[in-house]
Image (spheres, helix red, strand yellow):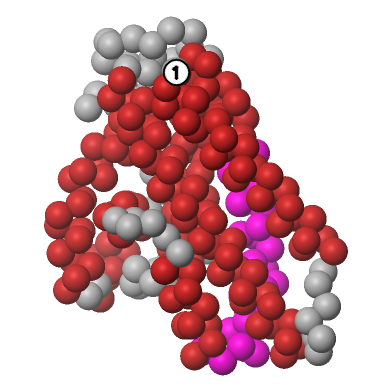
Amino acid sequence: MTTTTTSPAPVRRAPAPAGRGAVTDLTDHALLHRALRSGTRVVADALSGVALDEPCCPVRQRELVRWTTRVLAEVRAHAALRRGLEAALSRVVLPGGSPDPRRAGGDAALDSALARARQALPLFARDVSAGAPALAVALTDLADLVAARLDAEEDGVLPLVDEHVPAAERERLVRAARRSLPAGQALFTLPWLLDACHPAERVRVLRTASRPARTVLRFAGARHARTRDAVLGLPW
């Protein structure tokens, strides 16, 4: 596999996958879940293609690194939030907070995939040929694990959290998770979330967005679109 400076061949852009319910604002957990599913899968598929000799010019390489870095940060933050919510739920529903061994095993697998992706990313940033195979495997594993964990959250954990954990505690945990993100993350996250909306949802989401969020979207939206297209292999 070699790095080339020619423009990648255009590929079809997949539509945002359907979520389990329509969203109305940028803070809706259904929208974040949809973005996490698509964000991890898109970059896993892109790196798998590069590992199999799909063209990867320097611009695409740079934007793959940027996208992967930001998505990994979101996965880490969401994992921390989920653990906080599960701990809060255990204190209410299971006095003593007894952990579920199956959940602990899932956390270990997710942490391992995250660690492998973080280790492979700097090598890919330096050398596409050397770094793409290991990064593709780690990101594919991560995308599978993220999808499985989100399914479990939606089917079991979140309804119980909504029922038993006070809203103030949920909001505190969300704020703590967002504070763990790196500086400038919102410039990626907000347009990334909006990009995961279906057309009708975009209208509602933009209508309910705060003024600061709309400012970020105006400022960063075009930049995010270029990053997304480069990740997908479309001309810059």
The residue type indicated by label 1 comes to Asp
Report the front residue among 222 and 124. 124
Report x, y in % for residue 13: 36, 34
Look at the image and tell me whether residue 34 can be seen. no
The quadrant in which residue 209 appears is: bottom left
Seen in the picture, residue 102 relative to 91 is either above or below; the reply is: above
Secondary structure, mark 1, is: loop
At which x and y percent is residue 197? 35, 57
- Which stretch appears magenta? 141-167
Q: Could you tell me which residue is drawn at 58 percent across and 84 percent down? A: 162
**Residue ID at (68%, 45%):** 112
Above or below — where is 156 with respect to 172? above
> Which image quadrant is residue 102 in?
bottom right
Residue located at (49% from left, 69% from top)? 177
Is residue 47 found left or right of 198 in the rendered image? right
Residue 233, x across and y down, in percent: 35, 25
Q: Which residue is mark 1?
A: 127
The residue positioned 72% from the left and 90% from the top of the image is 92
Check residue 105 for magenta coloring: no
Q: Magenta span: helix, strand or loop, mainly?
A: helix
